[in-house]
Image (tube, coloured by chain):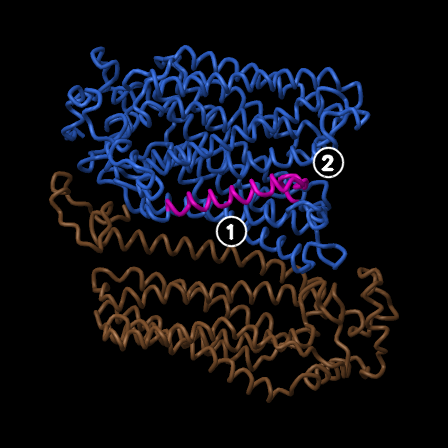
Amino acid sequence: MSVVTKPVTMPAPNLVAGEEDNYLTHSSGFLSWALTLDHKRIGLMYLTCVMASFALGGILALLVRIHLWNPNLDPTQALFSNKVYNQIFTLHGAVMVFLFIIPSIPAALGNFLLPIMLGSKDVAFPRLNLGSFYLWVAGALFFLFSMFATGLDTGWTFYTPYSIESQGPVVAATMGVFVLGFSSIFTGLNFIVTINTMRPPGMTWFRMPLFLWAIYSTAIIQVLATPVLGITMLLLAAERILGIGIFDAKMNGDPVAFQHFFWFYSHPAVYIMILPAMGIISELMSVHSHKGILGYRMIAYSSIAIALFGFLVWGHHMFTSGMADVTTIVFSALTFTVSIPSAIKVFNWIGTMYQGTVSLNTPMVYALAFIFLFTIGGLTGLFLGALSTDMHLHATYFVVAHFHYVMMGGTLVAFLGGLFHWWPKMTGKMFNDFAGIVSAAIVFVGFNLTFLPQFVLGTRGMPRRYASYALEFQDLHRLSTIGAVMLGTGLLVAALTLLHSLFYGSKAPRNPWGGATLEWECSSPPPHDNFSSAPTVGDPYDFSNIEYDPKVGGYFKKK
Amino acid sequence: MTTAVAPAPTEHDHHEHPSWLAHHFDDAEQQFDAGKMGMWLFLVTEVLFFSGMFCAYALYRNRNPEVFEFCSTFLNEKLGAINTGVLLFSSLTMAWAVRASQLKETKTLIGMLGATLGCAAIFLGVKAVEYSHKWALGLFPGKFYISQVAGAPHSEVPYLWYLSIAPLVMLVCFILYYIYGIVTASKFHLRVAGPLVIAAACFFGGVGLGLVLEAEEGHGDTHASASHQEHSADHAHTDAAIPTVNLLSTDTAPLNDVATTPAESNTPDSSVNQKGMAGLFFSIYYCMTGVHAFHILGGMLVITWLIVKAANLEFHSKYYGPVDNVGLYWHLVDFIWIFLFPLLYLIT
């Protein structure tokens, strides 16, 4: 415990700007990035690409909302034709799910942080890691192709039989998903092996930061679920090219089988999206409350529990698709079990703040927003998991609102929180905290304004994916559109805050927030090899010897 | 703690890192453990990948068992059995190669890797015969399936030649490479080119073997009509009793009703012998064996990579992870075939 490595005990000299070799200045030139095996650079490249995808998906979302400003009862007067509208919401969903949310936290932040939090030099397979990134790029290119070929209108779920008959470039899109799937599999595989075999001396399983537990659980799902998506997409492509008929009712095939195959991946994929977000929140709650996490083991176990339960509930997407009654009841019951580990986490996060010294800075504000939004998202899931209410709510705006509360209010907000939290570590620059808090506030209000009305729309019977609607829905739709524009503004403020810091931000100290995990023990930004020697590992949530040093504007660990 | 015990922190930097040990690993054991675990996880994903198709198989066999009985008569179990034997043998040579790499017996290692590669090529050669034969009969997947009619002439398209073009080009290239090795008198090139030439030649050995066995079984029409008769006999029917026109016209009938219509319930040939029935079986057949064949091809690529490394004398008792891991992968590919063979070929 007390053996702290040399640079850690002497933070001050290293803080002189420009003198220190870090991973950003270690080598230069295009190839030094394009061919890098450094997990930090790969993480940063992921971050850039993932954010670009998010911007694309976000613009598509705004187009959808602007289109729905009017009821469009006369399609000729509408902003987009029905066909174009179908393409826009399809691409919004597909880009957000496959290009943004799934890789966002694990591939971008996870790649950057996992080896540093483990005190190792890199992930177990650095070449495979770079390969994953290029697979992501290749998959994204397929998607861009299907975007410019204009016509992918199947929805992101590619349900048969429509996806067999649609004129759109379904094969290109499915191949994109296939390739992206392998990117995700290899990332997960890399992380599992790294955590299993490369923990430093002293870091037992229960001394790992909770973010790593979350990433580990996520990686299990990535490895176990994604191959099924891969084969499903391959079969769908074969369906279109060779007419194999497995999912085609005209050929005695079974379209519902496609839904089973698809959701066997895509429901666990929901946990690929949310679990890492939960990991971020566990870190943020503890660090910014300057207090050890409440119920460490329960949070760790609940991550694994969510990952495992997540495999047993896919049928709840298909309550109305035609399944045996017993099957629907079993799936419904299993669905409710997932709420238990989720509730444990929320309880522990709130308990962590109790009697803590809460610093209300940007990451913490985002984390608080997460808890509020995720709780609403989780609780509204119960209505959809219950058979009787789902019959009414299935395929309405209620579903749209529910999963946006979980995916966007949950994952995206946590991702932003994590991004602000680790931004000083990644770039070595401090951002303007006030601007960050303002962005969080606008995002929070805008988000609720966008999606709360959609719950009401859904319960009143507004179906999802429609390009037009009855006049009675107009007010709520307009509220939602106003909210979406506000949400977009908030995100823009967040982006500008971060970009501004790159150019005008002050030099970040080693440990600006007072974290006790290993990434705060190396300089900001970290050196090429992370640690010159394997660091000694203590309790990641022991804040008793973390003290503030006003000279550097950051914290340090007392010897 | 599954990991190797890392050296004390302060000593770490002074440890020598041999060229075969990646910079981020502490020692050989950690590197080996990581590689092995990664490969096992990859194998798990492979099993799940195939599981989708096994599910589809279970679903449709459960729904239409008579289709699977009818169609498996078109599969030549002798060819399947030979291929099973070839793959099992290749697993032996692969395991032997792992041992040889640990003992640093480079000659044996390259020999065994070459043998594995050769077996894989024989497998693909036999598979090429099987596929081309089925295509000639019109046994295509799904909507391309051509209803089988006794005595119908089969396609004259030389599918087997098409499938042989790439191996032939490769054989020529490898022979040229071998000659280049002789000219430059480079031991390395000769070590690499030798097994490659043999493997490419093995493909044609496999083709020959397949053709002989296929001919034994009865060629072309006789094979198809034989299975027809055999099958029809079970249901007290003869080929002649099923008019050709009827066979083809059922294609347009609502397919779901066909099997349940009482009048046709005991004429499985007419209800089964169509795109939505037999065609679907062949979809599953081609998907499963096709994806498996792609895994064989992938395996051949990595084995070639191993041969290059082995010719470079890179493997020794502390660094043989790649051979071990490729071996694991190869056994899995073998293992999947062991499931495919009975499930597809040995139904009746």
Q: Quadrant of residue B183?
A: bottom left
Residue B33 to residue A544: above or below: below
Decide whether residue A146 is among the magenta residues.
yes
Residue B15 to residue A548: above or below: below
State the separation of the CA atoms marked 1 and 2.
32 Å
| Label 1 chain ID | A
Lateral position of residue A314 relative to residue A6, left or right: right
Colour chain B is painted in = brown
Residue A185 to residue A400: above or below: below
Q: Are marks 1 and 2 in contact (CB under 8 Å)?
A: no
Q: Quadrant of the C terminus of chain A?
A: top left
**Residue density around tag 1, few if under 14, some if 14–19, many if 20 or more, within 10 Å:** many
**Residue density around tag 2, few if under 14, some if 14–19, many if 20 or more, within 10 Å:** few
Q: Residue at x 42, y 48 (%)?
A: A186
Q: Residue at x 41, y 28 (%)?
A: A280
Find residue A226 and report its horizontal and vertical position in percent. 51, 47
Identity, as a three-letter code, of the amino acid under mark 1: Pro
| Label 2 chain ID | A
- Pick whichever, A463 or A293, lies toward us: A463
- Pick whichever, A242 or B67, lies toward us: A242
Q: Which residues are magenta?
A: A129-158
Colour chain A is painted in = blue
- Mark 1, mark 2: which one is toward the viewer? 2
Q: Which residue is mark 2?
A: A83
Q: Residue at x 22, y 10 (%)?
A: A550
- Pick whichever, B345 or A24, lies toward us: A24
Identity, as a three-letter code, of the amino acid under mark 2: Lys
Residue A444 to residue A536: above or below: above
What secondary structure is the stretch in magenta mostly built from?
helix
